[in-house]
Image (cartoon, rainbow, N blue to C red):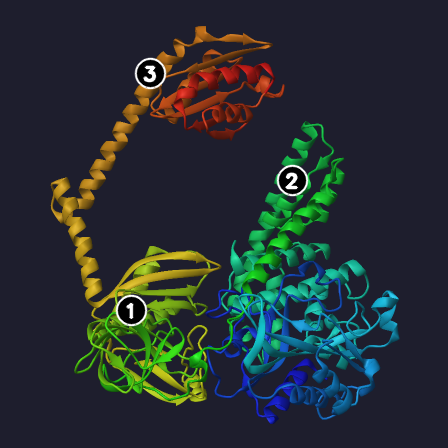
């Protein structure tokens, strides 16, 4: 059975059981800073589990793409460790519970219509205190007690939030898979290869509270996870996940590129498996907008790419090759994940660029390793430290075995124990970070059960008479609040927009005959009502009151201009930079807009000018903005862009600006682009992980910005005593004058240096076997100090020169050592570092010339005395 068929059967089975089939979410978590990656099928559904959002259908199933990198060193060496994998899941949010999920799991696994496993090959584990699960497996399903193993570890708990016991289902692969495992581990759930875990059913029935206590959940949930790759390995009757149709085409393509054969040499097999795993991870991550970088997700992708390239070298692949495997990933996965096919050209470009950079980095790493080896020999050592080896590995992606090979060629060894310790510390930091951030919110709160409907009417109205349905203070319903008090308020209808999709909440007032309350913001309750944060300014606000809900129209107008401009900007970016550009976040406020997007490389000033021009061109064309509700399939067929991280129902809101821009969006927009007035970029920058940010203003805020810039220009022209049009020419003239003065100053510095140098030659001391000049001089800065040192090098070719000069409270140092003395072990960089440390500073440089700075000029004499002591010691 092909993997694609297994996935289809899973989704079809649970659709028959009344589940909503949730599309796979992006690998990049949306509005969830606790996760680096989506790492489980339930991760994108966390708001359902902790009660922040109530789903339309409490039964959900999915096939979710996931990334986990905590066991990266095992990838390629075991049968089923991966960085990218698919987790099949079915979930119940307060609907069915243990009996249904266990019964359905057994049906799906054993019925020949679905998976058709031999029931005799299946065993389960349960939590010892979960008698209900034990009885269901034993009495309802008919599993003998000998195949129901009680394990204390069968309790799913990641800290604060929903948790509970679980039951795991294992498939017996046969006696031949048990060889080599300790007898005491040969059971379902033990550390062995014979019993393969295929499905984990988690019964979320408790809240893990902040104080460490456990209380029953208001709504019990089901969260399950099954590995598609594991199912495939069993149903295709192959030895490992890597031998399934999910990996074999990639492995065979790589083997063909390298001119090797799979399963011919163990070393080659590991390399082929690592490459196959990592190209899947990288291709999918790039498709979801993550680009290689030195931080966060981008760093993970960079490490994986470099790791794969290193394993390519094991196969003899010394040129970029990973990018050529992208198409094969698309061939395997594209039917269910079209993004890896649609973005293939972009993914290939990103990977090829990164591969080329890494080949250069490997060369740099070799050069640094050569320096480390030379330094070790110079110090009379025969071992490269574990810390140095780890630095090469972690910073340059340099493999430990390559470091070992190089060291051996040069008569050295490498401290493996120190390297392993550094690696262990890194993993421990990562593990703690995961443990501290992966928990969910505690389920509950009065809004979780509040289902009275509230209508949003703000697309068409900014003023509306409304009835106060509920007032909440301290998570309790209240009858009313008085002057100066704050609360959360729900109205039967509201024109106020609640923050979502990057657009901030409206502000305004609620006014009645005897009450006035300020609306400071909003959020959406679990059942979708708009909840207003209000503070009563006068009178008393009570449940049942009818008030006039008035949105601040001025702020709303500014927000609408910025939101529509954001859509135009998105399109202009794609036109100028390429179709790979995708939104990676946005903020739409009254004063400005901020737009984050995926793009590698910098953006030129010419490109920014063209982007700005294209947006303004649409403004000047006065294009009507048409907004319709359409079925999602029809909207996609029209070419509508979906915004980053947003979830969409069957009917979607389509915002269309002529034939220029069409996006799915729930925000507020102008009715015609001319209402935007003017669009002006404020700045552009990189914010990490291959994501860049543009900030801009529109309308009156753009006018105010331009007026401010014009005022600055007027001030400049006044200071320059010129017309505005002549400012560039006047600045150019002043720059030329400064250059000429700098040249004159440099000439004078040289003359002063020569004079100063001629007066110092009689201060040379004999220190041991060498001559030393250590003196304080008057210099205009580091350049002047170097100039004096250069003069002295000509006059005193055999002397070590140590010069210091004061610059206010700080001090500068320069040290020069003749080449003959460098060969004897004297080193300017080491000497200047020690001297500067006396004055609370530091620095370094080449063996023959170095400079440094210090913070405490009062210790100049002590520093120069220290120089004499160090030279006497042969530094």
- Give the left or right position of residue 134, taking residue 326 as reference: right
Q: Is residue 695 above or below residue 768?
A: below
Please tell me whether mark 1 sits on a helix, a strand or a loop: helix
Q: Marks 1 and 2, how far apart in space? A: 51 Å
SS class, disc 2: helix
Q: Whole-Å distance between the Cαs marked 3 and 1?
A: 58 Å
Q: Answer yes or no: do the residues labelled 3 and 1 have beta carbons within 8 Å?
A: no
Residue 102 locus on image (x, y percent): 69, 86
Residue corresponding to mark 3: 752
Label 1: how many Cα within 10 Å (few below 14, some 14–19, many 20+): many
User: In percent of the image, x 37 and y 89: which residue is there?
Assistant: 453
Q: Position of residue 439 (x, y in %)?
A: 55, 67
Q: Quadrant of the C terminus?
A: top right
Question: Does residue 816 lie above or below 340 as drawn?
Answer: above
Q: Residues within 10 Å of mark 2 (few under 14, many from 20)?
A: many
Q: Which mark is residue 369?
A: 2
Label located before the other in sequence (1 or 2): 2
Say if residue 665 shows up in the picture: no
Whether pointer 3 and pointer 2 mark residues with C-beta atoms closer than 8 Å, the reply is: no
Q: Quadrant of residue 212?
A: bottom right
Residue under label 1, please give it: 615
As drawn, the residue found furthest toward the top would be 762
């Amino acid at each position: 059975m092909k993997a694609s068929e297994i996935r289809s059967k899973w989704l079809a089975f649970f659709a028959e059981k009344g589940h909503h089939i949730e599309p796979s979410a992006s690998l990049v978590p949306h509005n969830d800073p606790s996760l680096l990656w989506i790492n489980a099928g339930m991760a994108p559904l966390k708001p359902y589990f902790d009660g922040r959002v109530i789903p339309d259908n409490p039964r959900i199933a999915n096939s979710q793409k996931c990334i986990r990198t905590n066991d990266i060193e095992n990838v390629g060496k075991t049968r089923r460790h991966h960085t990218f994998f698919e987790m099949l899941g079915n979930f119940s949010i307060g609907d069915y519970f243990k009996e249904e999920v266990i019964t359905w799991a057994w049906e799906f696994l054993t019925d020949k219509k679905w998976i058709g496993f031999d029931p005799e090959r299946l065993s389960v584990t349960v939590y010892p205190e979960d008698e209900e699960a034990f009885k269901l497996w034993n009495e309802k399903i008919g599993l003998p007690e000998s195949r129901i193993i009680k394990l204390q570890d069968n309790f799913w708990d990641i800290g604060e939030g929903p948790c509970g016991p679980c039951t795991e289902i294992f498939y017996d692969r046969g006696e031949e898979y048990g060889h080599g495992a300790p007898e005491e581990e040969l059971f379902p759930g033990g550390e062995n290869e014979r019993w393969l875990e295929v499905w984990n059913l988690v019964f979320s029935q408790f809240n893990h509270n902040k104080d460490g206590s456990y209380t029953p959940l208001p709504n019990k949930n089901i969260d399950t996870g099954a590995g598609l790759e594991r199912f495939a390995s069993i149903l295709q009757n192959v030895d490992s996940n890597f031998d399934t149709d999910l990996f074999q085409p990639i492995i065979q393509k790589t083997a063909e590129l390298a001119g090797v054969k799979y399963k011919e040499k163990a070393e080659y097999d590991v390399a082929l498996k690592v490459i196959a795993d990592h190209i899947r991870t990288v291709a999918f991550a790039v498709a979801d907008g993550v680009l290689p970088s030195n931080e966060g997700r981008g760093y993970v992708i960079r490490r994986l790419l470099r790791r794969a390239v290193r394993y390519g070298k094991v196969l003899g692949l010394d040129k970029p090759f990973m990018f050529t495997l992208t198409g094969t990933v698309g061939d395997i996965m594209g039917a269910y994940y079209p993004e890896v096919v649609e973005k293939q050209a972009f993914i290939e470009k990103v990977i090829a660029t990164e591969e080329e950079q890494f080949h250069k980095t490997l060369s740099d790493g070799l050069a640094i390793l050569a320096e480390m080896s030379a330094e070790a020999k110079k110090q009379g050592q025969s071992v490269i430290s574990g810390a140095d080896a780890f630095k090469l590995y972690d910073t340059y992606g340099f493999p430990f075995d390559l470091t070992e090979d190089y060291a051996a060629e040069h008569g050295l060894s490498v401290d493996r124990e120190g390297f392993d310790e550094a690696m262990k510390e890194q993993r421990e930091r990562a593990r703690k970070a995961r443990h501290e951030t992966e928990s969910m919110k505690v389920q509950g709160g009065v809004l979780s059960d509040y289902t009275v409907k509230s209508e949003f009417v703000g697309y068409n109205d900014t003023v509306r008479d409304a009835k106060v349905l509920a007032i909440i203070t301290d998570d309790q319903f209240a009858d009313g609040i008085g002057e100066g008090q704050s609360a959360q308020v729900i109205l039967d209808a509201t024109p106020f927009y609640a923050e979502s999709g990057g657009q901030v909440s409206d502000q305004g007032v609620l006014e009645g005959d005897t009450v006035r309350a300020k609306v400071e913001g909003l959020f959406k309750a679990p059942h979708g009502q708009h909840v207003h944060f209000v503070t009563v300014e006068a009178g008393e606000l009570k449940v049942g009151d009818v008030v006039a809900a008035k949105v601040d129209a001025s702020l709303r107008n500014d927000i609408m201009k910025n939101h529509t401009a954001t859509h135009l900007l998105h399109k202009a970016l794609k036109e100028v930079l390429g179709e790979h550009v995708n939104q990676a976040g946005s903020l739409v406020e009254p004063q400005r807009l901020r737009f984050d997007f995926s793009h590698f490389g910098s953006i030129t000033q010419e490109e920014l000018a063209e982007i700005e021009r294209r947006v303004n061109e649409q403004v000047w064309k006065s294009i009507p903005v048409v907004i319709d509700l359409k079925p999602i399939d029809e909207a996609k067929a029209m070419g509508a862009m979906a915004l980053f991280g947003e979830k969409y129902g069957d009917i979607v809101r389509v915002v269309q600006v002529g034939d220029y821009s069409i996006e799915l969006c729930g925000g507020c927009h102008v009715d015609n682009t001319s209402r935007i007035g003017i669009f002006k970029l404020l700045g552009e920058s990189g914010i990490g992980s291959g994501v860049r940010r543009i900030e801009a203003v529109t309308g009156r805020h753009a006018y105010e910005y331009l007026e401010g810039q014009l005022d600055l220009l007027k001030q400049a022209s006044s200071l320059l005593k010129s017309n505005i049009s002549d400012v560039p020419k006047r600045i150019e003239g002043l720059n030329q004058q400064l250059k000429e003065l700098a040249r004159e100053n440099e000439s004078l510095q040289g003359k002063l240096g020569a004079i100063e140098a001629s007066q110092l030659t009689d201060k040379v001391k004999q220190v041991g076997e060498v001559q030393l000049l250590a003196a304080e001089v008057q210099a205009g800065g580091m350049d002047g100090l170097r100039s004096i040192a250069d003069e002295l090098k000509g006059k005193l070719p055999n002397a070590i020169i140590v010069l210091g000069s004061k610059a206010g409270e700080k001090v500068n140092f320069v040290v020069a050592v003749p080449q003959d003395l460098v060969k004897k072990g004297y080193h300017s960089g080491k000497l200047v570092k020690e001297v500067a440390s006396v004055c609370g500073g530091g620095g370094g440089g080449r063996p023959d010339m170095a400079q440094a700075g210090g913070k405490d000029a009062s210790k100049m004499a002590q520093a120069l005395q220290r120089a004499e002591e160090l030279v006497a010691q042969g530094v």
